[in-house]
Image (cartoon, helix red, strand yellow):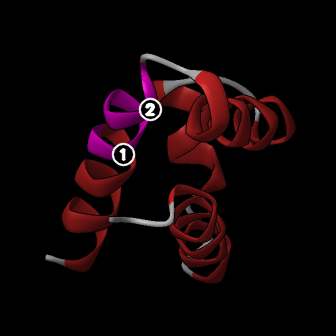
Amino acid sequence: MVDKLELVENLIKEIKFYGLENEIETEISDMKSFEKEFFEEAIHGNYFWNYISIVSKILFEHLS
């Protein structure tokens, strides 16, 4: 099973490493709120995989 908190932590590190905070803010919300909401979704949320999908899309577009 996927450790959701570790996954979120690693994805946030990747976003910051590649300087993609602006893309997150365009797609979802400001980075600070995004981080908080992403971790909350990993623990309790129904929209966790939606967040994963959006972040994956942003990373994929950047790295392509």
Residue 31's x, y, as percent?
Answer: 76, 41
**Rendered view: 53 above or below 37:** below
Q: Which of marks 2 and 1 is in front?
A: 2
Residue 53's x, y, as percent?
Answer: 26, 41
Quadrant of the snapshot with the C terminus: bottom left
Residue 3's x, y, as percent?
Answer: 50, 66
Question: Of the numbered discs in the image, which one, if any, rests on residue 52?
Answer: 1
Q: Residue at point 32% right, 35% down?
A: 49
Whether label 2 touches label 1, CB < 8 Å: yes
**Rendered view: 4 above or below 22:** below
Residue 43 sits in which quadrant?
top right
Q: Residue at point 53% right, 28% down?
A: 26
**Rendered view: 35 above or below 16:** above
* Mark 2 neighbour class, 10 Å CA radius: few under 14, some 14 to 19, many 20 or more: some
Comparing 48 with 31, the one in front is 48
Residue on which disc 2 sits: 48
Q: What residue type is labelled 1?
A: Ile
**Rendered view: 56 above or below 40:** below
Tag 1's secondary structure?
Answer: helix
Q: Which amino acid does label 2 sit on?
A: Phe
* Mark 1 neighbour class, 10 Å CA radius: few under 14, some 14 to 19, many 20 or more: some
In this picture, which residue range is highlighted in magenta? 47-53
Question: Of the numbered discs in the image, which one, if any, rests on residue 21?
Answer: none
Magenta stretch: helix, strand or loop mostly: helix
Residues at marks 2 and 1, CA–CA distance in whole angstroms? 6 Å
Quadrant of the snapshot with the N terminus: bottom left
